[in-house]
Amino acid sequence: MKKRVMSGVIALLIIALALAGCGGSGGAGSNEAGGESGSGEAAKSKGKITIYSPNAAEVNNPIVKEFQDRTGIEVQLISGGTGELLKRVQAEEANPLGDVFWAGGADSLEAYKQYFEPYKTSEFDNLQPEQIGSSQHWTPFAALPMVIMYNKELVKEDEVPKSWMDLLDAKWKGKIAFVDPAKSGSSYTQLVTMLTAFGKDGDQGWNYVKKFVENIDGKLLSSSGMVYKGVADKEFPVGVTLEEAALRYVEGGAPVGIMYPEEGTSAVPDGAAIIKGAKNMEEAKQFIDFLVGKDVQSLIQKEFKRRSVRKDAEPIEGIPAISEMKLVNYDFDWAAANKDELIKKFNRIVTGQE
């Protein structure tokens, strides 16, 4: 644990230096992103912005700090689960208190698009078309494959689960870290991925989910961070999580590994969106442009193992390209349009009503 803490501190220092050294490239250093190359007090704008984000602090903090340093815009960061924060945006519809929603699965953002302001980022032409939504109510931030994470000290090499089906083995009963999809955008994406892998249009997908829920044995977690931390800290031998979260623990020296399920996984992006009626609209647009500028997108690949959504992104060493992975035919629009219904059905399964 001490090794991971020290590694995290060193990483934050490296991130601050890396971002500070790439002031003029991409949208982050352009006029659209708040100033001429971010240098000099005269180049900085003034203002403030409130950001709702389910991101991990180690991802948020250095990026927010650099945005403040470059633009002079004061950031208030409010953290929480994706579901919790989306409900907050909905409740504040008549009087928005936030300006930007940053992170959370894009299918979850699409399901709440009526609460977001359409915006075409100044970096639009630099983004991968397959990562962009049709309505422009959100902007992609990173492509996020879903994986099975396991603890090497608790799982024998010949017992590592290689597929979604392997998670139904009786030996994992009560030992699988998984989050309530109503509270986590990534977990909702995982639910739809499982349904799709086994057939979302018939009974097979839900039959799998019922057996999976039975093997969870009532241990449904409340936040995505509890999955990768729980597996790394040996509270659970296996879990379903984001690739980048698991890879950060691998990089930090934790005894964990990852598997891409043999039936196929998904690589849906998380995203950022401007809250409809935001009181700091121009500052919100600057922040969106900053997130998908070349500087920040290069940073998330090098330091966080998150896959960039830019066309000019370099491959990440040590992990397969998305084109080399087996992916399910993830129906993004279906996942967004049916989110409430699918979560209600999942909850009925959990409570034994189905």
Image (tube, rainbow, N blue to C red):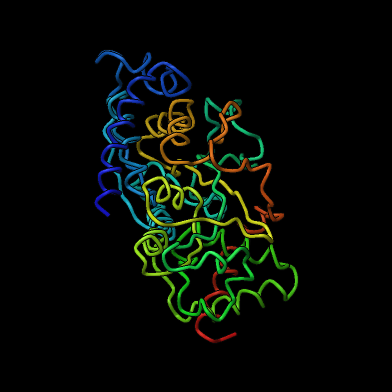
Position of 55 relative to 351 (above/below): above
Q: Could you say which is closer to the camera, residue 124 or residue 232?
A: 232
Where residue 268 sits: x, y (%)?
Answer: 59, 49
* Lateral position of residue 1 relative to residue 187, left or right: left
Q: Where is residue 335, by image quadrant?
A: bottom right
Q: Where is residue 99, by image quadrant?
A: top left
Q: Can residue 348 be seen in the rendering of this structure?
A: no
* Lateral position of residue 48 relative to residue 253, left or right: left
Position of 83 relative to 350 (above/below): above
User: How many labels were placed on the picture?
Assistant: 0
> Which residue is outermost to the right?
202
Q: Quadrant of the N terminus?
A: bottom left
Where residue 43 sits: x, y (%)?
Answer: 31, 14
Q: Could you say which is closer to the camera, residue 59 or residue 163?
A: 163
* Lateral position of residue 14 relative to residue 311, left or right: left
Q: Can residue 290 be seen in the rendering of this structure?
A: yes
Where residue 257 sits: x, y (%)?
Answer: 49, 56
Where residue 20 sits: x, y (%)?
Answer: 32, 22
Q: Please tell me which residue is depicted at 65% across the width and 42% down the height of the picture.
A: 134
Position of 24 relative to 90 (above/below): above
Q: Please tell me which residue is depicted at 42% across the width and 44% down the height of the picture.
A: 102
